[in-house]
Image (cartoon, helix red, strand yellow):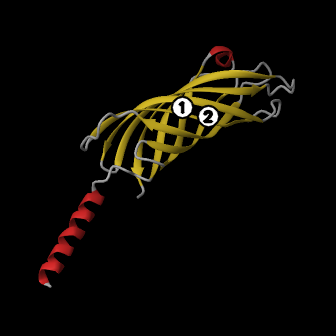
Amino acid sequence: MRMTIVTAGLALTASLAGAQVSETLPLEVRPFIGASIPTGSQRDLFDDELLVGAQVALGVTERFQAIATFAWVGGTANYPVSEDGVDIYQYDFGAELDLRGAEVMMPRFTPFIGAGLGGRSYRYASNDLSDNACFSAYGAVGAEFRLYTATFRAEARDNVFCYESPLGTGQSRTRNDVTLAIGLGLSIF
């Protein structure tokens, strides 16, 4: 009887110890800070600006995660009728795949790729410019350094989106910008 209890206790202890070092992190919150860098004709209307935001990542498999991201850029709109402030909000859903090779021990360095779809909204401080929103898509590359339940991350995104003129002309064009961000990932459980 004692041998059965001891064996069961050792088996339970071993399984709990294995669970504590599991690399599957089902839910992670990732605050970040970086820069929004307009490209092409978008650069004529907006300058490089500070970007802040957060992601929530849900582990689907050990190497694949579903991502929800919200980011804010506070800047200045460079229009002839107004050079007032503008709040730019980006919100999207995507997926991320880590590109690590064979299983490794902690700590670990892992490159990743990602892609997603969402939207972008512009809220202008000037009454001469109309607020608007439109669809967006992104592709991302980056790397993370994980130490148990904490992660330091660096990510570059190429954002493609439709942009409607706030001057009331009804024109919509495809535009582009790049975001560079660093952040911290914290595993919830």
Q: Amino acid at mark 2?
A: Gly
Asked whether residue 46 appears in the rendered view, the answer is no
The answer to which quarter of the image holds residue 2 is bottom left
What secondary structure is found at the residue carrying circle 2?
strand
**Label 2 vs 1, first from the N-terminus:** 1
Question: Which secondary structure, mark 1?
Answer: strand
Name which residue type carries label 1: Leu
Q: Residue at x 24, y 70 (%)?
A: 12
Outermost left residue? 3
Q: Quadrant of the C terminus?
A: bottom left
Q: Is residue 1 left or right of residue 87?
A: left
User: Closest to the observer: 124 or 159?
Assistant: 159
What residue is disc 1 on?
50
How far across and down, in percent of the image, does residue 78 sit?
70, 21
Quick one: 189 or 172, which is closer to the camera?
Answer: 189
Whether residues under marks 2 and 1 lie with C-beta atoms below 8 angstroms apart, the answer is yes
Circle 1 crowding by C-alpha within 10 Å: few under 14, some 14–19, many from 20: some
- Residue 79, horizontal then vertical, whole percent: 75, 21
Question: What residue do we see at 21% from left, 74% from top?
Answer: 8
* Residue 93 in view in this figure: yes
Q: Position of residue 39 (x, y in %)?
A: 61, 17
Residue sticking out furthest to the right? 169
Q: Quadrant of residue 162?
A: top right
**Total marks placed:** 2
State the residue in front, 128 or 169.
169
Which residue position holds label 2? Answer: 74
Spatial separation of the CA atoms under disc 2 and disc 1 = 7 Å
For the residue carrying disc 2, how many other residues have a C-alpha within 10 Å: few (<14), some (14-19), or many (20+)?
A: some
Q: Is residue 68 left or right of residue 89?
A: left
Residue 126 placement (x, y as % from top left) = 77, 33
